[in-house]
Image: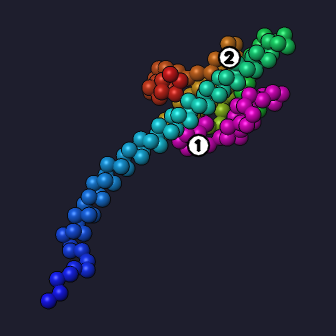
């Protein structure tokens, strides 16, 4: 009589499927959190680069005897933070997109066309950043519905 088995029983297969299901249930939420953390890290990196570029542009202007901050942070709506046409803030501008982890097209309103707001979309929320030409400040509001996300991006 031959006593060798050449396959798995149904109980063994069901057990393996249950274990794989448990592992997947634990791993999938962790991957989603990792994607959100990556979007926040990208936003923090972009903001740091933009702020450093504003300061660098200001120092260049001071050496030339011009005490003003750069008037606007973009020259087109397809590539942001590429300067105002006469100078370049970032060597390569940041492309515009409407999905998570991207900057949206700027909104320039009011009597002064150089007052623009920039939205960064993260975790389905648009966090609005405003550039102030008066003091070179590029920041978001720490009040309202996006205050917590603003803190994550700039603190």
Q: Is residue 114 left or right of residue 143?
A: right
Please state which of residues 67 and 29 is positioned toward the viewer in this rendering: 29
- Dominant secondary structure (helix, strand or loop) of the stretch shown in magenta: loop
Q: What residue is drawn where x is 83% and y is 27%?
A: 86
Residue farthest along the right direction in this orientation = 64
Which residue is tagged 1?
98
SS under mark 2: loop
* Quadrant housing residue 115: top right
- Relative image position of residue 90 (x, y in whole percent): 72, 31
- Give the CA separation, mark 2 to mark 1: 26 Å
The residue carrying pointer 2 sits among few (fewer than 14), some (14 to 19) or many (20 or more) residues within 10 Å by Cα, namely some
Q: Is residue 72 visible?
A: yes
Question: Disc number at residue 136?
Answer: 2
Q: Is residue 55 left or right of residue 4?
A: right
**Magenta run includes residue 97:** yes
Look at the image and tell me whether residue 114 can be seen: no
Q: Position of residue 104 (x, y in %)?
A: 61, 37
Question: Could you tell me how many numbered marks the image carries?
Answer: 2
59 up-or-down from 85: above or below: above
Residue at the extreme bottom of the image, as rendered: 1
Q: Earlier in the sequence, mark 2 or mark 1?
A: 1
Mark drawn on residue 124:
none
Q: Which residues are magenta?
A: 76-103
Percent coordinates x, y for residue 98 in the rendering = 58, 43
Residue 117 is situated, as x and y percent measured from the top left of the image, at: 63, 27
In this rendering, position of residue 65 left or right of residue 121: right
Residue at left offset 72%, top offset 27%: 73
């Amino acid at each position: 009589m031959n006593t060798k088995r050449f396959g798995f029983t149904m109980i063994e297969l069901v057990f393996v499927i249950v274990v794989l299901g448990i592992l997947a249930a634990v791993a999938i939420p962790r991957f989603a959190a990792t994607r959100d953390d990556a979007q926040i890290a990208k936003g923090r990196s972009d903001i740091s680069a933009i702020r450093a570029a504003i300061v660098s542009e200001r120092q260049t202007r001071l050496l030339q005897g011009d005490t003003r901050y750069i008037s606007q942070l973009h020259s087109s709506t397809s590539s942001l933070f590429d300067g105002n046409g006469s100078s370049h803030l970032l060597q390569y501008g940041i492309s515009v997109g409407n999905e998570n982890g991207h900057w949206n097209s700027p909104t320039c309103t009011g009597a002064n066309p150089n007052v623009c707001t920039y939205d960064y979309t993260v975790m389905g929320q648009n966090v609005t950043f405003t550039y102030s030409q008066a003091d070179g400040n590029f920041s978001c509001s720490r009040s309202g519905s996006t205050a917590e996300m603003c803190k994550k991006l700039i603190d």
